[in-house]
Image (cartoon, rainbow, N blue to C red):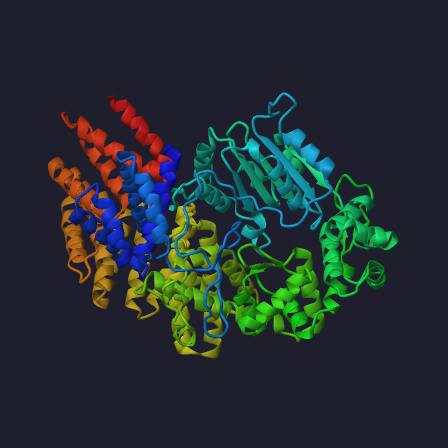
């Protein structure tokens, strides 16, 4: 019953958030007021709803995802309290949500497994289209169920499924054979590893009552030569286990500890698709007894045998297995009518399921095509595509020199395409990312989106593309190689670079719009205004996509574009896209991705500066110096979070040099602020000097908010080095400046008030410190900034813990802080819980 009420409260809070930012809010507000007024006065309910609406609008305008999530969490708790207090409220709330659902903006959403979630949006000028999440992202499910379902019939692999069940399922007595089972399916690309893993997962789902998690390392890896970011995989899993972004630690070790803490006591299945390194499996093994990790890999990963993993090879299908697959797709009667031709097709496909699937699609869609005719057609081309001939590297096979080729299948299917579809197919092989939407395909091929969709559908019909459940398209690795070879043979020299340039421009436009939608007044060096003037802004539409969610959904594609752009010398596009892309990372802690994108951007700015100096282009020299200063100073943030302090210092010193060569006062002030935050750790005197320089530069530039922020950091630095009185004076000035703005920044002013409380405590003025911190707690609570609210509460408990008579207050403060950290999935909750236990009743 409690779980049902919690789910109903969560659904109510989600609906409420969506309505608050919709055109239907005024209409919905009256109905919600009547529901709440039965438990509270009408006036109180109206005020409560209006305040939350204003807070949410402000958070959205500032791109503050943490604040938006906090508001939703607050309403979820509020509704749950109502449901607990009034048994009749549940039925009424269900009816109200059904009624209010009709007022929500209508969007076309396709659900499914996360590959870049699907929202099919409007067109942007020039055929740019996009696919993102629905306008209000759903909270992770309490029982995650993320493993993709099979979309085609599954046959064969009986022996491998039995081996998996023996190793990872249960024994005849219902007991698991190991506390945590680990299995690895390995074999050639296209041999059916993922399909076999998904089929076993489906068969064994009842063994994992606490959920099934999924990580696609191919998606994490993109087109990078590296194996995929384990730290980012941990962050994804922690989010799936309901840990909020602000409580996901920076370091790999801390993320691993938090992940294992959240897995304790849970029986989970974790499927890891396309891993390439043993560490990608070892690090992610949960510690809940009865849990299982099932990985697929092109490599054997023999080192995992030392950890007790069961290594199960998948070889190409034998003749009988290949015929079974054809019967599943074509029907027994069709195969029985041409048995020799069917056997020949299995032979030509080398037993690779991916090739047999394409053969079956050819026979299904080919008008009058027979198996005998297709076998004759394929018989001439078995060795055409040498680059796609796959040597058998499985240790289970002795004939390691034997090759399996899909060239005949792909080549013959390609020849049947109409000229414009064939050209699109070739150019898709050159897209930086193997999963894409129609807008990206259109941009790469210089087509309008409507025409691109028609051609993409024809490629899906020929099984040369797969349409995902998010209404995106995916090109299998082998098909992609074939498309690239066709492009190299038939396209003009330089076309691959041109495709990359068009796609990079496409993403620069959308990322720039998203960046500005999150915060209009952010410091920027790039000026893509000419590009933006020619495009429609999708994020301005009433039912448009949330910019932060769009950036998050597209981050692997954007990283792939940055890598490709750098490879082809598109330095101006790369550094501009890197700067716009940073908007995501200021809200979401994808540290490895942030680090790589800024490294690519900073290096691109440096190379662009070299070219500008050769051309003696003074305007471009100045702009690229500003770009390099901005990107290298930003790069210090993820580097410090990752513990790379020496590298962060080196980047900042270079940023200072670049910035000082320009007359951009605000940029120079920003670089000094970043330098101060680095020096806080290693040189307190240097930090004070850097913050003073930042304050002076911001003041000279007329940047009042920047000056107030610099004064806040300066006050903290002064307090840290022992100048408490001067720190108080500086902090009070910063707080007043934040409150005196045309739109007072109450949240930031409350953060300054926390620092003021600390300074009073250092001076021994405990009562004054408590008063300041109490005020900060109230403001942060009212503005939904629960993360900082918890900081202030812990500070209150810390400075009063030795004062007699405050035990009840301290327990109250710590209990609220514990509640906040528990809701966010923070590991700090354990420390707070022990502190409370030590205090006793």
Q: Which of these two is toward me, 159 or 615?
A: 159
* Depth order, front residue of 123/365: 365
| Residue 804 spot, x, y in % from top left | 14, 25
Left or right of 370, for residue 498: left
Report the quarter where the N terminus lies. Answer: top left
Q: How many marks?
A: 0
Residue 840 in which image quadrant: top left
Name the side, left or right, on which 407 lies relative to 837: right
Residue farthest to the right, as pictured: 340
Query: Where does the C terminus fall, quadrant-wise?
Result: top left
Q: Residue at x 64, y 60 (%)?
A: 465
Residue 832 spot, x, y in % from top left: 30, 31
Judge whether 615 appears above or below 309 on screen: below
Residue 67, x across and y down, in percent: 30, 50
Residue 123 position (above or below residue 764)? below
The reply to whether residue 695 is visible in this rendering is: yes
Q: Quadrant of residue 535?
A: bottom left
Answer yes or no: is residue 718 visible. Answer: no
Relative to 459, residue 642 above or below: above
Percent of width and height locating residue 448: 54, 74
């Amino acid at each position: 019953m409690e779980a049902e009420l919690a789910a109903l409260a969560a659904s109510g809070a989600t609906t409420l958030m969506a309505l608050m930012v919709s055109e239907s809010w005024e209409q919905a507000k009256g109905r919600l007021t009547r529901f709440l007024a039965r438990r509270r006065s009408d006036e109180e309910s109206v005020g409560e709803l209006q305040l939350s609406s204003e807070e949410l609008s402000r958070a959205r305008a500032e791109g503050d995802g943490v604040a938006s999530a906090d508001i939703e969490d607050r309403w979820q708790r509020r509704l749950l309290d109502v449901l607990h207090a009034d048994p009749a409220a549940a039925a009424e709330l269900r009816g109200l949500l059904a009624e209010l659902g009709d007022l929500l903006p209508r969007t076309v959403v396709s659900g499914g497994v996360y590959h870049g979630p699907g929202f099919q949006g409007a067109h942007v000028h020039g055929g740019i289209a996009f696919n993102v999440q629905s306008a209000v992202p759903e909270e992770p499910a309490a029982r995650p169920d993320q493993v993709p379902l099979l979309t085609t019939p599954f046959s064969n692999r009986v022996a491998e499924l039995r081996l998996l069940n023996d190793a990872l399922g249960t024994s005849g007595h219902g007991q698991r054979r190991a506390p945590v089972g680990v299995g690895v399916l390995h074999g050639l690309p296209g041999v059916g590893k993922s399909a076999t893993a998904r089929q076993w997962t489906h068969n064994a789902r009842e063994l994992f009552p606490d959920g099934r998690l999924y990580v696609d390392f191919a998606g994490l890896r993109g087109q990078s030569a590296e194996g995929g970011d384990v730290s980012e995989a941990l962050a994804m899993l922690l989010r799936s286990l309901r840990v909020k972004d602000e409580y996901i630690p920076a370091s790999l070790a801390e993320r691993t500890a938090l992940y294992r803490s959240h897995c304790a006591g849970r029986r989970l299945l974790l499927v890891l698709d396309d891993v390439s390194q043993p560490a990608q499996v070892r690090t992610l093994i949960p510690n809940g007894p009865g849990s299982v990790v099932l990985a697929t890999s092109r490599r054997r990963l023999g080192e995992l045998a030392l950890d007790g993993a069961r290594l199960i090879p998948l070889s190409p299908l034998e003749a009988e297995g290949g015929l079974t697959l054809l019967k599943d797709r074509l029907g027994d009667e069709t195969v029985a009518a041409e048995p020799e031709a069917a056997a020949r097709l299995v032979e030509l496909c080398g037993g690779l399921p991916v090739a047999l699937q394409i053969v079956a699609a050819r026979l299904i869609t080919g008008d009058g095509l027979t198996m005998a005719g297709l076998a004759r057609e394929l018989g001439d081309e078995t060795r055409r595509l040498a680059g796609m001939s796959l040597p058998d590297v499985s240790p289970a096979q002795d004939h390691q020199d034997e090759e399996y080729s899909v060239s005949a299948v792909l080549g013959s299917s390609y020849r049947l395409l109409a000229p414009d579809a064939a050209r699109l197919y070739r150019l898709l092989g050159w897209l930086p990312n193997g999963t894409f939407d129609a807008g990206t395909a259109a941009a790469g091929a210089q087509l309008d989106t409507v025409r691109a969709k028609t051609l993409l559908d024809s490629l899906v019909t020929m099984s040369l593309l797969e349409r995902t459940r998010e209404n995106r398209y995916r090109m299998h690795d082998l098909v992609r190689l074939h498309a690239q070879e066709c492009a190299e043979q038939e396209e003009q020299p330089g076309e691959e670079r041109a495709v990359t340039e068009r796609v990079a421009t496409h993403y620069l436009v959308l990322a720039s719009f998203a960046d500005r939608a999150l915060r209009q007044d952010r410091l920027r060096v790039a000026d893509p205004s000419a590009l933006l003037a020619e495009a429609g802004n999708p994020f301005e539409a009433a039912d448009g996509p949330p910019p932060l969610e769009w950036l998050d959904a597209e981050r692997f594609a954007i990283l792939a574009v940055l890598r490709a752009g750098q490879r082809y010398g598109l330095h101006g596009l790369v550094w501009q896209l890197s700067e716009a892309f940073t908007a995501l990372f200021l809200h979401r802690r994808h540290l490895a991705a942030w680090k790589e994108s800024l490294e690519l951007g900073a290096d691109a700015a440096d190379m662009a500066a070299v070219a500008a100096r050769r051309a003696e282009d003074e305007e471009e020299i100045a702009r690229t110096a500003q770009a390099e200063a901005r990107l290298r100073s930003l790069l210090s943030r993820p580097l410090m979070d990752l513990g790379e302090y020496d590298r962060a210092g080196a980047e900042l010193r270079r940023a200072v040099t670049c910035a000082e060569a320009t007359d951009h006062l605000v940029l120079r002030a920003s670089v000094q602020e970043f330098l101060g935050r680095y020096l806080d750790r290693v040189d307190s005197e240097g930090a004070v000097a850097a913050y003073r320089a930042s304050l002076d530069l911001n003041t000279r530039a007329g940047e009042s908010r920047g000056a107030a922020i610099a004064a806040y950091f300066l006050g903290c630095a002064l307090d840290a080095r022992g100048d408490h009185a001067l720190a108080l004076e500086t902090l009070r000035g910063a707080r007043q400046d934040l409150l005196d703005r045309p739109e007072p920044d109450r949240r930031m002013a409350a953060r300054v008030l926390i620092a003021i409380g600390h300074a009073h405590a250092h001076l021994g003025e405990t009562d004054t410190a408590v008063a300041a911190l109490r005020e900060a707690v109230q403001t942060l609570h009212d503005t939904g900034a629960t993360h900082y609210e918890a900081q202030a509460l812990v500070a209150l408990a810390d400075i009063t813990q030795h004062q007699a008579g405050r035990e009840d207050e301290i327990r109250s403060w710590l209990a609220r802080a514990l509640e906040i950290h528990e809701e966010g999935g923070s590991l700090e909750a354990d420390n707070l819980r022990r502190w409370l236990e030590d205090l006793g009743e």
